Image: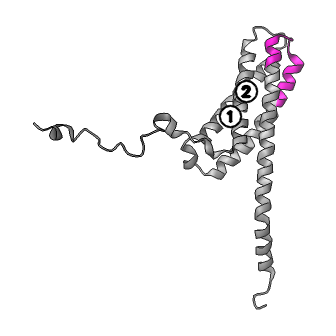
């Protein structure tokens, strides 16, 4: 029997564009949807909130545990939310969802997470027992909350710049609507 008859139905001659240097899971991650400074901020948010959560989990005993438990909830939630936003930006899921909704969700999630993380860090400062793990968690919490808030300020600045670019179009359109038709 000829080799062509045996191997032709199962052998693929041309591997196609899906295979190559970016194959497997790497083909599904796109880091260029965010500018480099926003990628760095998102990575720092993820890392610092994880470190705050891990340091808080190391704490073995507490006298006033309410602040610790609130900080635990907020740091874990911040880690999971920042991971979710990063996954949405870096995977093909970003193309399936309306990009304005993703950016709007990122805007409000970042603001809410930064404010609540800052509040949890302040509460934890006032109720901690001064162990090294608690102090490390507090430091990571404060830095993470500032990274979230800095990211929010950058997004707010970009939104304002975007609206300033659109503003001249709106004024000329408004002026055109107020002019008489037979002028």
The one nearer the camera, 115 or 38, is: 38
Badge 2 vs badge 1, beta-carbon distance below 8 Å: yes
Within 10 Å of disc 1 (Cα), the crowding (few <14, some 14-19, many 20+) is: many
> Which quadrant holds residue 53?
top right
The one nearer the camera, 27 or 180, is: 27
Residue drawn at (83%, 27%), measured in percent from left and top? 142
Magenta stretch mostly in which secondary structure? helix
Q: For this view, does 17 lie left or right of residue 110?
A: left
Q: Write down the residue under mark 2.
A: 49
**Can you name the residue that lies furthest to the bottom here?**
182
Measured as percent of width and height from the top left, residue 44 is found at 72, 31
Q: Write down the residue under mark 1.
A: 82
In the rendered structure, does residue 82 fall within the stretch colored magenta? no
> Which quadrant holds residue 65?
top right
Q: CA distance from mark 2 to mark 1?
A: 9 Å
Location of the N terminus by quadrant is top left
Measured as percent of width and height from the top left, residue 160 is found at 80, 55
Within 10 Å of disc 2 (Cα), the crowding (few <14, some 14-19, many 20+) is: many
Above-or-below relation of 103 to 52: below
Measured as percent of width and height from the top left, residue 119 is found at 84, 29
In the rendered structure, does residue 124 fall within the stretch colored magenta? yes
Tell me where the magenta segment starts and ends, as one range: 118-136
């Amino acid at each position: 029997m000829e080799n062509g008859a045996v191997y032709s139905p199962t052998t693929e001659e041309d591997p196609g564009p899906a295979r190559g240097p970016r194959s497997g899971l790497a083909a599904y991650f796109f880091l260029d949807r965010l500018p480099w400074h926003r990628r760095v901020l998102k990575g720092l948010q993820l890392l610092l909130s994880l470190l705050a959560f891990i340091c808080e989990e190391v704490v073995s005993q507490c006298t006033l545990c309410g602040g610790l438990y609130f900080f635990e909830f907020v740091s874990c939630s911040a880690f999971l939310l920042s991971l979710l936003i990063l996954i949405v930006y870096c995977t093909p899921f970003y193309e399936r969802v309306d990009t304005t909704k993703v950016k709007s969700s990122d805007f409000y999630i970042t603001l809410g997470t930064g404010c609540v993380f800052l509040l949890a860090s302040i509460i934890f400062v006032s109720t901690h027992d001064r162990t090294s793990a608690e102090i490390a968690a507090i430091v990571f919490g404060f830095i993470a909350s500032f990274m979230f808030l800095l990211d929010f300020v950058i997004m707010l600045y970009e939104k304002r710049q975007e609206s300033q670019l659109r503003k001249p179009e709106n004024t000329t359109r408004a002026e055109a609507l107020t002019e008489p038709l037979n002028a």
